[in-house]
């Protein structure tokens, strides 16, 4: 079982990575670290606080505008069309065409039809 606990044999790449990380960890000493200093009173600049307040106020204004425009009293029924619809009719002809009644004449055909 390898060190990670997976139960597999470490690959050559994994062995090389572990060796490189161990060598790097051994090369860092106390002289390489920065000295300890207590934190200062002002961790964040004032600009950050002003920016957060401005973003908060803009978000609040956007929500208020959204509520205002969606809750305004509007017409209770749907809007009428821009112009009333006109019936589509063909223009009247100058001379009416005569209507002939059609009379059905029996035609001889095979019996039983």
Image: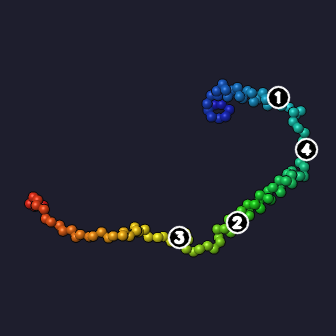
Which numbered disc covers residue 37? 4
Helix or strand or loop: what does disc 4 sit on?
loop
Residues at discs 3 and 4 in contact (Cβ within 8 Å): no
106 left or right of 98 in image: left
Q: Earlier in the sequence, mark 2 or mark 1?
A: 1
Which numbered disc covers residue 27? 1
User: Going 57% across and 74% down the picture, which residue do you hit?
Assistant: 76
**x, y percentage for residue 105?**
15, 66
Q: Earlier in the sequence, mark 2 or mark 4?
A: 4
**x, y percentage for residue 70?**
64, 68
Q: Earlier in the sequence, mark 3 or mark 4?
A: 4
- Front residue of this view, candidates 75 and 22: 75
Q: Is residue 41 above or below residue 64?
A: above
Per the image, the residue denoted by label 2 is 65
Total marks shown come to: 4
Q: Earlier in the sequence, mark 1 or mark 3?
A: 1
Picture quarter containing residue 7? top right
Per the image, the residue denoted by label 3 is 83
Helix or strand or loop: what does disc 1 sit on?
helix
Picture quarter containing residue 4? top right
Residues at discs 4 and 1 in contact (Cβ within 8 Å): no
Q: CA distance from mark 2 to mark 3?
A: 32 Å
User: Among all residues in the image, which is located at the extreme front?
Assistant: 94
Q: Earlier in the sequence, mark 2 or mark 3?
A: 2
Residues at discs 2 and 4 in contact (Cβ within 8 Å): no
Q: Is residue 8 above or below residue 109?
A: above
Residues at discs 2 and 3 in contact (Cβ within 8 Å): no
Which numbered disc covers residue 77? none
């Amino acid at each position: 079982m390898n060190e990670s606990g997976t139960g597999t044999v470490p690959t050559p790449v994994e062995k090389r990575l572990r060796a490189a990380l161990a060598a790097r960890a051994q090369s860092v000493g106390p002289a390489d670290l920065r000295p300890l200093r207590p934190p200062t009173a002002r961790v964040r600049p004032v600009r950050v606080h002003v920016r957060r307040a401005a973003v908060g106020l803009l978000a609040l204004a956007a929500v208020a505008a959204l509520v205002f425009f969606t809750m305004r009293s509007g017409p209770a029924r749907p809007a009428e069309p821009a112009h009333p619809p006109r019936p589509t009719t063909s223009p009247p002809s100058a001379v009416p065409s005569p209507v002939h009644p059609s009379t059905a004449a029996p035609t001889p055909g095979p019996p039983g039809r």
